[in-house]
């Protein structure tokens, strides 16, 4: 079932692209809402591999209509990612994988400044934040 939800998320993300499919988006809205209800318990269940968790998270973002984020090309399995704080544009480094899981501001010549461990994020809270941006 996880693979089917992942595929459905990729299809929905494609439907949300700007290609004049507004009628189709409205027509399939009830199906997308049902898919979103199906994916939430899978994400919350835990025990997923990192790749499966990321695939389902991306599918959930697509079902929520946040296709830009759902199509982001992060593998989130091992590495450093630089993002900007949505409130102040401060560059923040996120480390995930063998390097542990934390975020920090990197100071020139100082290394990681204000390192903080990553906390689990409830999908509904993230959805609310993404819609504010």
Image: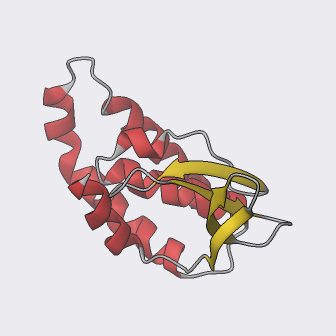
How many marks can you see? 0
Between residues 43 and 27, which one lies in front from this camera angle? Answer: 43
Q: Quadrant of residue 50?
A: bottom right
x%, y% of residue 46?
61, 81
Between residues 106 and 11, which one lies in front from this camera angle? Answer: 106
**Residue depicted at x 25% and y 58%:** 33
Classify residue 59 as left or right of residue 47: left
x%, y% of residue 53?
61, 64
Looking at the image, what colour scheme do you see? secondary structure
- Taking 20 as reference, is 132 above or below it? below
x%, y% of residue 101?
71, 72
**Residue depicted at x 13% and y 28%:** 23
Classify residue 22 as left or right of residue 34: left
- Taking 106 as reference, is 74 above or below it? above
Q: In which quarter of the image is residue 93?
A: bottom right
**Residue depicted at x 26% and y 66%:** 128
x%, y% of residue 121?
47, 76
Residue at far front of view? 109
Classify residue 9 as left or right of residue 95: left
Task: Identify the image quadrant of the N terminus.
Answer: bottom right
Residue at far top of view? 19
**Residue depicted at x 40% and y 67%:** 38
Between residues 67 and 35, which one lies in front from this camera angle? Answer: 67
């Amino acid at each position: 079932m996880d693979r089917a939800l992942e595929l459905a998320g990729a299809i929905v993300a494609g439907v949300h692209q700007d290609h004049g499919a507004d009628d189709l988006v409205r027509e399939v809205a009830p199906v997308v809402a049902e898919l979103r209800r199906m994916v939430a318990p899978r994400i919350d269940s835990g025990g997923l591999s990192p790749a499966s968790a990321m695939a389902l998270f991306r599918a959930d973002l697509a079902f929520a209509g946040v296709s830009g984020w759902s199509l982001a090309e992060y593998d989130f399995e091992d590495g450093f990612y630089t993002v900007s704080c949505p409130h102040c544009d401060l560059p923040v480094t996120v480390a995930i994988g063998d390097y542990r899981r934390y975020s920090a501001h990197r100071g020139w010549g100082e290394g990681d400044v204000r390192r903080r461990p990553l906390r689990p994020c409830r999908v509904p809270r993230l959805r609310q934040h993404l819609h504010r941006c």
